[in-house]
Amino acid sequence: MTDWEGFARKLALHRTHYNHWNIGVTSVVIAQFDPPGPRAEALAARPPPARGALGNAYFVEEAVHERAWLIRLLAVAGLVAAWYSARRFDDALAFAFGFVLTFFLTAPTYYYYIILLLPFLFFAAHPDRLRGTLGLLYLFLYGALGFTFYFRWDQYFTTYYWNSVLALGVTIAMTAGALGRFTPWPAVRATPRGSR
């Protein structure tokens, strides 16, 4: 329990002190963009703390508080989608659908996104259906684009803003896929050792 308490404290810290490495719905909501025109003028128009960031997207800490109402509204929408969808699933699919809640209710830094294994399991549960195949293809493209963003903008907000947009696409695909018909994963029956 001590490890889980430490994990919860760390996630709470990411919510209250936002940084440009966070991925989640908050990153999508708080993003601000440079106006079109010469790069030097766009950078001069930014608040001083954001002037050194690569890319055309940035955020200021005040935006997290100013747009908190929208972040909370989207969190409620994520909760409703999860409640409606997960009550129709078996335990394994309901667990995998937890990614939707993670995206809307928390703001972990990018290295926590090993949890993309959950949507992978969600889509892989039904590879014979179009939604499963398209979901897996989307996750592959997400990974490829994520590396491209990293090499283009390094570890600046623009990189994680676009990764957050792609993760939002995962949650939309999972929620849309949850509206269809699902069958439970087949039970795996262990064969006793030594028997054939």
Image (cartoon, rainbow, N blue to C red):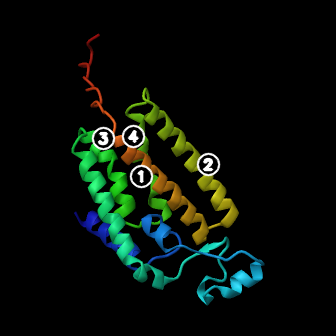
Label 3, label 4: how far apart the Cα atoms are:
8 Å
Q: Amino acid at mark 1?
A: Thr
Label 1, label 3: how far apart the Cα atoms are:
14 Å
- Secondary structure under the numbered disc 4 in the rendered image: helix
Image quadrant in which you'd find residue 55: bottom right
Q: Amino acid at mark 3?
A: Leu
- The circle on residue 121 is 4
- Image coordinates of residue 79 in percent, x first then y, are 28, 58
Q: Is residue 85 left or right of residue 126?
A: left
- Crowd rating for badge 4 (residues with CA inside 10 Å; few <14, some 14–19, many 20+): some
The answer to whether 3 is drawn above or below residue 166 in the figure is: below
Which-is-in-front pick, marks 2 and 1? 1
| Residue with the mark numbered 2 | 144
In the picture, the quarter occupied by the C terminus is top left
- Crowd rating for badge 1 (residues with CA inside 10 Å; few <14, some 14–19, many 20+): many
Label 1, label 4: how far apart the Cα atoms are:
13 Å
Q: Are marks 1 and 3 in contact (CB under 8 Å)?
A: no
Q: Are marks 4 and 2 in contact (CB under 8 Å)?
A: no
Q: Which of pointers 1 and 4 lies earlier in the amino acid sequence?
A: 4
Could you say which is closer to the camera, residue 35 or residue 149? 35
- Crowd rating for badge 3 (residues with CA inside 10 Å; few <14, some 14–19, many 20+): many
Q: Amino acid at mark 2?
A: Ala
| Residue with the mark numbered 3 | 93
- Image coordinates of residue 5 in percent, x first then y, are 26, 68
Q: Is residue 70 left or right of residue 92?
A: right
- Secondary structure under the numbered disc 2 in the rendered image: helix
Label 4, label 2: how far apart the Cα atoms are:
19 Å
| Residue with the mark numbered 1 | 171
Q: Which of pointers 2 and 3 lies earlier in the amino acid sequence?
A: 3
